[in-house]
Amino acid sequence: MDNVQIKIKRLPNCEDISLPTYMSKCAAGMDLFAAVKESVKLLPGDWVAVSTGFSMALPPGFEAQIRPRSGLSLHCGISLMNSPGTIDADYRGEVRVIVVNHGKETFIINRGDRIAQMSIQRVYTGCFEVVEDLSETERADGGFGHTGV
């Protein structure tokens, strides 16, 4: 298994908040924990940026993807507004998660709750070449729903 070294900084007044944690041996994502000062009431249809209590320095060529937790999505209708969210290698601010309530009931976010997961990914930079024509394929310009429902 390949590992990448990531420098992480715990933010002030967040000593009680767990840093990103893999919850099982083969987990692809690390759970992120809410560093809210007091409980947040999230009404159906509302969203909020939730602090995680840390910042980090990813090495060049990597990103962190922030994704919803499947259990919160299935059982409570909780997701992330920009999923997956991207943390770039040159960002040094606090990692925050935009949590949205797609459910039918109010959702409470408490300090220390697991609110999202983070996966580390390699990034490739695209280099564009302007051309007059593109190679043809069977699909051509078939887009949304072109293969049926």
Image (cartoon, rainbow, N blue to C red):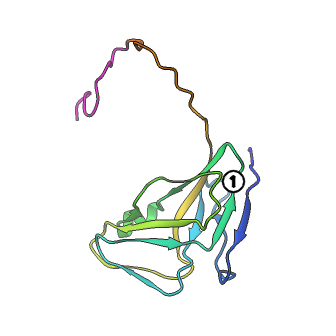
Mark 1, residue position: 58
Residue 146 belongs to magenta span: yes
Instruction: Depth check: give the residue in front, 95 or 90.
Output: 90
Q: Position of residue 60 (x, y in %)?
A: 70, 45
Circle 1: residue type: Leu
Quadrant into which the C terminus falls: top left
Name the residue at 61% across, 65% down. 93
**Residue projecting furthest to the left:** 149
Q: Which residues are magenta?
A: 137-149
Q: Is 4 left or right of 45, judged from the image as shown?
A: right
Image height check: is 66 above or below 103? above
Give percent across and percent down for residue 15: 69, 81
Mark 1 crowd level (few <14, some 14–19, many ≥20, 10 Å Cα): many
Residue 15 vs 4, above or below: the answer is: below
Q: Is residue 97 left or right of residue 81?
A: right
Residue 133 sits inside the magenta stretch: no
State the quadrant of the N terminus: top right
Q: Answer with left or right where residue 5 lies relative to residue 148.
A: right
Q: Nearer the viewer, residue 63 or 44?
A: 63
In the picture, measured across the screen, residue 109 lies left or right of residue 6, that is: left
Relative image position of residue 34 (x, y in whole percent): 54, 75
Could you tell me how many numbered marks the image carries? 1
Residue at horizontal 29 percent and vertical 77 percent from the top: 105
Secondary structure mostly seen in the magenta stretch: loop
Q: Nearer the viewer, residue 70 or 101?
A: 101
Residue at 47% from the left image edge and 19% from the top image edge: 130
Q: Can you give x and y, in whole percent of width and height, for residue 64 in the image?
A: 60, 53
Q: Which of the 4 image quadrants contains residue 14?
A: bottom right
User: Could you tell me which secondary element the residue under label 1 belongs to?
Assistant: loop
Relative to 40, say whether 129 is above or below.
above
